[in-house]
């Protein structure tokens, strides 16, 4: 997507200069008081200039240059058709905002590199969107129904968008589990006052299902984006992720954190994403040079809603409650000092104390992990991955024989820098950081030796950091 340097004419007649990937959306933010102090004081503003530049650095340079111009020079720039591309991009945007009747949405899975089970404990997490995705072919309908055609499962269901609370289909039968995710998204969007129109969606996925790679969040975000496109409203990606999380928490019933929906919504090709789940600030970080990210699917499955996920979440909340009885100032897990926890460990119920040790240790590991990525220290990052796995195995107790086998085998192979279970655990996948030149041999050896050890056939593949959910050809 291109970058634009834009000018707004404010109510007081002065010009405000800024940059954005989408000047129209930015204008809406300024006029809603969410842009800059100056435009808030001088709203409403009108978009009068937009010039396309190739990248962020060019946008920043042009922005500073325009800011130094006198008002007459700004006016002449605005009337210069070779520089001011506003008419062209207005036409393009109108064409885009014509609600299409048929379109395709791509929505990726994610792999979490570091920071497990801390997105519901105010920690920082380090996931990336991957090049495995759900593809949704969408057709808009006049009637308020959702027709789902889950191609991989060869299952179809039709439900009313006006009766989402009942969780039943048009024949009053309970919705099958796969339909709860799209229905939940419609339910959350409607509750937020965003209209959802009738859709017929045929979708399929190459993300292994129930394997810890966020196949559910990919479906959720894919549908949210489909409704945004079909209905013509637009919300911030973070808001979209939060609404999808609400669908999963309150409609489907899994009390997940924000990591999965965030990653699917915000993925940036070639980058990991560091999300601070307390402040919701996030940044991109480059993956270590000359390394490959390899995913190994253990072929062992567990349904999350039936697993210990919600139980772990409850244990963490109990643990924080207990810690607060000794120190009432603890606003969040981020305030728990490891030495304070250590000093009180013997007084806590064993399981609860173990969960607390994992959370506090993992929060620290991610902080170190971000520094490793900033410094391009693949070795250091890999060690943190191994430490994270041990903690998930011994303290958080969400690993399995299969996942441990994958990590053990990986650790013994040449070129392996780090390996750990990824996602909620209780089955699913491991993520491995491998020196690039060793990746093909690593993949072969890991899958062979895993089969020897467990009798199961793992699917082992390299993956690449990709962009988030998007309209095909956007
Ligand atoms: C699942 C949840 C996430 C997160 C991970 C564990 O993927 O959906 O919110 O809690 O487990 O880190």
Image: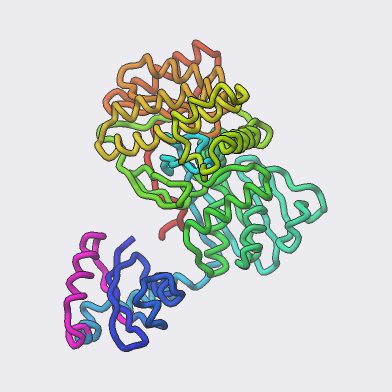
Q: Extreme top residue here?
A: 452
Q: Residue at x 43, y 77 (%)?
A: 31
- 288 part of magenta stretch: no
Query: Which residue occupies the extreme right position in the image?
Result: 172
Nearer-the-camera pick, 115 or 231: 115
- 23 relative to 455 in the view: left or right: left
Q: Total label count?
A: 0
Q: Residue at x 76, y 60 (%)?
A: 163
Q: In the image, is residue 271 above or below residue 382?
A: below
Q: Identify the image quadrant of the C terminus.
A: bottom left
> Does residue 156 appear anywhere in the picture?
yes
Residue depicted at x 60% and y 66%? 194
Q: How is the image coloured?
A: rainbow
Q: Position of residue 5 (x, y in %)?
A: 27, 70
Question: Magenta part of the protein: which range?
Answer: 48-74
Residue 52 colored magenta?
A: yes
Residue 433: image location, x then y, percent = 36, 28
Q: Quadrant of ligand 1?
A: top right
Rendering coords of residue 319 (x, y %): 59, 33
Q: Out of 361 and 14, give the one closest to the viewer.
A: 361
Q: Please say if 365 is above or below 195.
A: above
Image quadrant containing the N terminus: bottom left
The foreground one among 45 and 316 is 316
Say if 444 sits above or below 92 in the image. Answer: above
Residue 131 appears in the picture as rendered: no
Please tell me whether residue 120 is drawn above or below residue 230 in the rendered image: above
Residue 466 in picture, x, y percent from top left: 39, 45
């Amino acid at each position: 997507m291109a970058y634009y340097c834009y000018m707004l004419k404010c109510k007081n007649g002065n010009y405000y200069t800024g940059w954005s990937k989408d000047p129209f959306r930015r204008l809406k933010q300024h006029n809603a008081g969410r842009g800059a102090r100056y435009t808030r004081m001088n709203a409403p503003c009108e978009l009068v200039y937009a010039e396309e530049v190739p990248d962020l650095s060019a946008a920043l340079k042009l922005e500073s240059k325009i800011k130094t111009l006198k008002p007459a020079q700004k006016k002449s720039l605005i009337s210069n058709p070779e520089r001011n591309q506003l008419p062209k991009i207005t036409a393009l945007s109108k064409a885009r905002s014509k609600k299409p009747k048929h379109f395709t949405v791509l929505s990726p899975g994610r792999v979490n590199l570091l920071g497990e089970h801390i997105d519901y404990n105010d920690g920082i997490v380090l996931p990336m969107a991957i090049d495995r995705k759900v593809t949704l072919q969408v057709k808009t309908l006049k009637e308020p129904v959702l027709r789902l055609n889950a191609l991989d499962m060869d299952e179809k269901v039709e439900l009313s968008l006006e009766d989402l609370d009942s969780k039943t289909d048009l024949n009053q039968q309970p919705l099958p589990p796969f339909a709860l995710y799209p229905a939940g998204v419609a339910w959350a969007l409607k509750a937020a006052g965003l209209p959802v129109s009738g859709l017929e969606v045929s979708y399929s996925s190459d993300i292994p299902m129930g394997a810890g790679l966020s196949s559910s969040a990919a479906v959720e975000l894919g549908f949210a984006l489909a409704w945004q496109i079909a209905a013509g409203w637009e919300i911030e990606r973070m808001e979209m992720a939060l609404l999808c999380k609400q669908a999963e928490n309150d409609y489907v019933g899994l009390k997940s954190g924000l990591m999965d929906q965030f990653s699917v919504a915000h993925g940036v090709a070639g980058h990991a994403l560091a999300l601070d789940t307390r402040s919701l600030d996030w940044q991109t970080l480059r993956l270590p040079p000359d390394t490959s990210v390899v995913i190994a699917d253990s072929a062992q499955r567990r349904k999350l809603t039936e697993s210990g996920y919600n139980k772990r979440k409850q244990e963490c909340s109990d643990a924080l409650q207990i810690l607060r009885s000794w120190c009432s100032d603890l606003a969040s897990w981020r305030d728990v000092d490891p030495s304070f926890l250590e000093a009180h460990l013997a007084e806590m119920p064993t399981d609860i104390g173990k969960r607390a040790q994992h959370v506090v240790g993992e929060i620290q590991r991610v902080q170190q992990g971000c520094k490793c990525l900033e410094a391009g220290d693949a070795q250091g990052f890999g060690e943190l991955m191994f430490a994270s796995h041990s903690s998930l195995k011994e303290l958080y107790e969400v690993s399995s024989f299969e996942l441990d086998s994958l990590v053990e085998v990986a650790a013994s192979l040449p070129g392996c820098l780090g390996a750990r279970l990824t996602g909620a655990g209780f089955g699913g996948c491991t993520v491995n950081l491998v020196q690039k030149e060793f990746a093909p041999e690593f993949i072969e050896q890991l899958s062979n030796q895993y089969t020897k050890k467990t009798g199961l056939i793992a699917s082992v593949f390299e993956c690449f950091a990709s962009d988030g959910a998007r309209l095909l050809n956007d």
